[in-house]
Amino acid sequence: MGMTKERVRYWFKNKRRIDRKHQNIQPQKKKKAVEDSDTIQLFLLILQKNPHFTNYGNPALLARSKWNKHQLTCWFQTYRREIGVPPKQGKLTDENLIDLEELFKEHQFVTEWESHDHELFVGVAAATIREWIEQKRQETMAMFLEPEELPCQLALLETSYRDTLVLRDTYQTLLLSKKANLEIEQVVDYFESRRVIDRTYGRLTDEVLTNVRAEVEQAERTDLLGPINGVMLSRKALTDARAIQFFPDLQNTYLPVNMSTDYKTWSATDFQEFAIQFLPRRVVSLFASGGLCGRDATFFYLKNKKFFDRLNIGSPKDQLNITWPEFMAVRDQIFFIKNYHANVAQQNGVISTTN
């Protein structure tokens, strides 16, 4: 044609402009996307797993839905305008709700890894399962049913809560977590949530809570130490001989019968007397068979996974010799004792220097 590419483009561009001006070109209707039920169900499933989905140009989604990016964008934005702010849980079907209700009857608490195991059973995302269980648990607690009418785990926690209102010590927390098969943090969260509900409905005042805590402290202080015959005492006797009677600064800390705070000098018996007060006998038996003493207490720290695995050699995954919360409970106790011993040694040094 004897024309450059630029002149050809300009000619067509100018021609279209003139035709539009004189309305010589009839606007064509855009092809509407076919909204079949399978395609819509796919979109709803995507929103259920991710309510804030915006990857409209996903090649797999474009190929499966046979919609273009603009059509997908319009559908998702229109749907969000209709339902308002996307719910965190997504849209749950009646079947999902039935499955979640069945799951809640057996498990009133679920950890992150447990929720992933329940994904296939319920058919919704793990995050949705955790949020629904937590919300359902709060609603059940707010109904103030009798403990006998509550599901198993909640019944155990509710009965203990009504007896004490507060967690007395680490041993009570560990015992509840073992009975209800829960993490320690979940037990603590339950007690805090129940106190919030009681305050909201006027069933618990700060004065009542203060009196309860005072009664707990007084009961611990007036429990005098029984006779010691130089033998391994029972858990009850050792609990009665807690350090709080001798060291007010160690209100939540346990010591062996000789009340030594220099844990590095503890014998194997001292270490067992220390551990039996807040750990199950299964764990104390493990310490006894391994001959653990005070020097080994320094191996209980957060990043020492190697020592934790060594203690669990030969144990099945579903029944460990010592669980991670129990391992960290030892770490916490040693940490408090170490700080207290260091402060006392520093004070004694200052006093001797002054004299």
Image (spheres, rainbow, N blue to C red):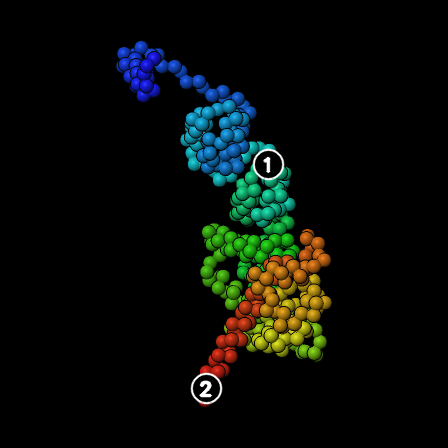
**Image quarter in which the C terminus is found:** bottom left
Which mark is on residue 123? 1
Q: Is residue 132 left or right of residue 319?
A: left
Q: Of all residues shown, which one is farthest toward the top? A: 24
Q: Earlier in the sequence, mark 2 or mark 1?
A: 1
Residue 185: percent from left, percent from top:
55, 56
- The residue positioned 59% from the left and 36% from the top of the image is 123
Residue 172 disc label: none
Residue in the foreground of this view, choosing between 2 and 161: 2
Q: Amino acid at mark 1?
A: Gly
- Residue 139 percent coordinates (x, y): 53, 45
The spot of residue 87 in percent (x, y) is 47, 38
Residue 159 location (% of width, % of height): 60, 55
The numbered mark at residue 353 is: 2
Q: Is residue 147 visible?
A: no
Residue lying farthest bottom? 355
Res. 70 visible in picture: yes
Q: In the rendered image, which quarter contains the N terminus?
A: top left
Amino acid found under the numbered disc labelled 2: Thr
From the viewer's perspective, is residue 195 above or below residue 78?
below
Spatial CA distance of label 2 from label 1 is 71 Å
Mark in front: 2 vs 1: 2
SS state under label 1: loop
Which residue is rendered at x = 53% and y = 30% of the image? 60
Q: Secondary structure at mark 2?
A: helix
